[in-house]
């Protein structure tokens, strides 16, 4: 069930993340953002895990994403893949989107579906709707990652949940480690990943065969083991490692220092 939303009326904006990656905490004191925009950004950053539970910068994740930003710039598909994954794991608003099948939804249809789950229509639902669509419209998550492609026609907007973006294998490994942390399980069949609401198939809108193909190219046996027996594809993770280690592996393979 959806709960009260924290982002006010604002969707996440690409410029906000760039401001934070370049200015860190100064974005809350020196930027031109208004007070409500700063509040919204703060809660986005917490759900993205760039700020921890003590309201401090989460140095491990921040440092890795900062390196990706410096190397690949703000349009980096890997950067925005990580942002969206963390939002899905920490925000009821974005995890709710995972439940919807691939289709094109009018703004009114999304509102109708949100009201069914929220069980009433009030300003919180309207705010949530604006945050969801705004994030898809003003960040690469929507059109580039094909998570929610926003189309305007006059004053109306529709959102197409399309899928099929070719995520790199380390983003997929990161996603599975996030799932392992959530469930306490470190071995999954491809079918178990597909059934889990927080599996990469549902969050990233990719197919089983794509995941299997991409995981097979990762050669780091310390983080990932893959077993293929007839029609069974088993993913084995290291319970002493984490999604940060998967991210560090990506940095190493790409030569990002």
Image (cartoon, rainbow, N blue to C red):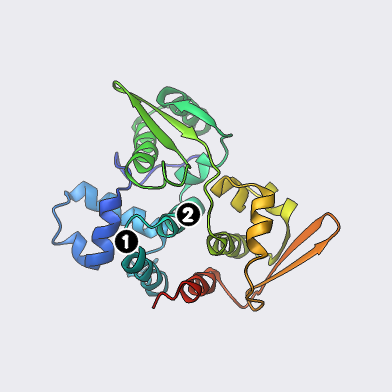
Contact between labelled residues 1 and 2, with CB atoms less than 8 Å apart: no
Check disc 2 and report the residue beneath it.
Answer: 90
Left-right relation of 92 to 217: left
Q: Quadrant of residue 220?
A: bottom right
Most extreme residue toward the right is: 230
Q: Helix, strand, or loop for circle 1?
A: loop
Q: How many marks?
A: 2
Left-right relation of 75 to 99: left
The quadrant of the image that shows the C terminus is: bottom left
Question: Which of pointers 2 and 1 lies earlier in the amino acid sequence?
Answer: 1
Left-right relation of 84 to 101: left
Classify 104 as above or below 58: above
Check disc 1 and report the residue beneath it.
Answer: 73
Instruction: Identify the residue at horizontal 74%, vertical 51% (top origin).
Output: 191
Viewer-proximal residue, 254 or 198?
Answer: 254
Q: Quadrant of residue 4?
A: top left
Left-right relation of 143 to 198: left
Viewer-proximal residue, 38 or 103?
Answer: 103
Classify 243 as above or below 120: below
Q: Is residue 198 visible?
A: no
Q: Residues within 10 Å of mark 1 (few under 14, many from 20)?
A: few
Point out residue 170 in the picture as x, y percentages from the top left corner.
54, 64
Viewer-proximal residue, 40 or 144?
Answer: 144
Q: Helix, strand, or loop for circle 2?
A: helix
Mark-to-mark CA distance, 2 and 1: 25 Å
Point out residue 129 in the picture as x, y percentages from the top left corner.
39, 34
Classify 32 as above or below 73: above
Q: Is residue 83 visible?
A: yes
């Amino acid at each position: 069930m959806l709960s009260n939303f924290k982002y006010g009326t604002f969707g996440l904006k690409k410029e906000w993340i760039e401001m934070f990656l370049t200015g860190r905490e100064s974005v809350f004191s020196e930027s031109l953002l208004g007070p409500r925009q700063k509040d919204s950004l703060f809660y986005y950053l917490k759900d993205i895990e760039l700020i921890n539970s003590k309201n401090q910068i989460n140095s491990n994740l921040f440092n890795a994403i900062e390196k990706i930003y410096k190397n690949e710039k703000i349009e980096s598909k890997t950067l925005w893949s990580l942002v969206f994954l963390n939002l899905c794991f920490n925000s009821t608003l974005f995890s709710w989107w995972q439940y919807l099948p691939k289709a094109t939804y009018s703004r009114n249809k999304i509102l109708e579906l949100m009201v069914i789950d929220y069980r009433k229509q009030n300003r919180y639902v309207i705010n949530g709707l604006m945050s969801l669509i705004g994030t898809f419209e003003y960040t690469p998550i929507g059109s580039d990652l094909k998570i929610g492609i926003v189309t305007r026609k006059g004053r109306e907007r529709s959102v197409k949940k399309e899928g099929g973006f070719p995520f790199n294998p380390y983003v997929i490994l990161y996603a599975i480690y996030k799932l392992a942390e959530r469930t306490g399980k470190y071995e999954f069949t491809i079918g178990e990943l597909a059934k889990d609401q927080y599996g990469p198939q549902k969050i990233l809108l990719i197919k089983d065969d794509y995941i299997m193909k991409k995981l097979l190219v990762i050669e780091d046996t310390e983080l990932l083991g893959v077993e293929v027996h007839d029609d069974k594809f088993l993913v084995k993770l290291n319970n002493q490692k984490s999604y940060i280690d998967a991210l560090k592996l990506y940095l190493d393979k790409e030569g990002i220092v």
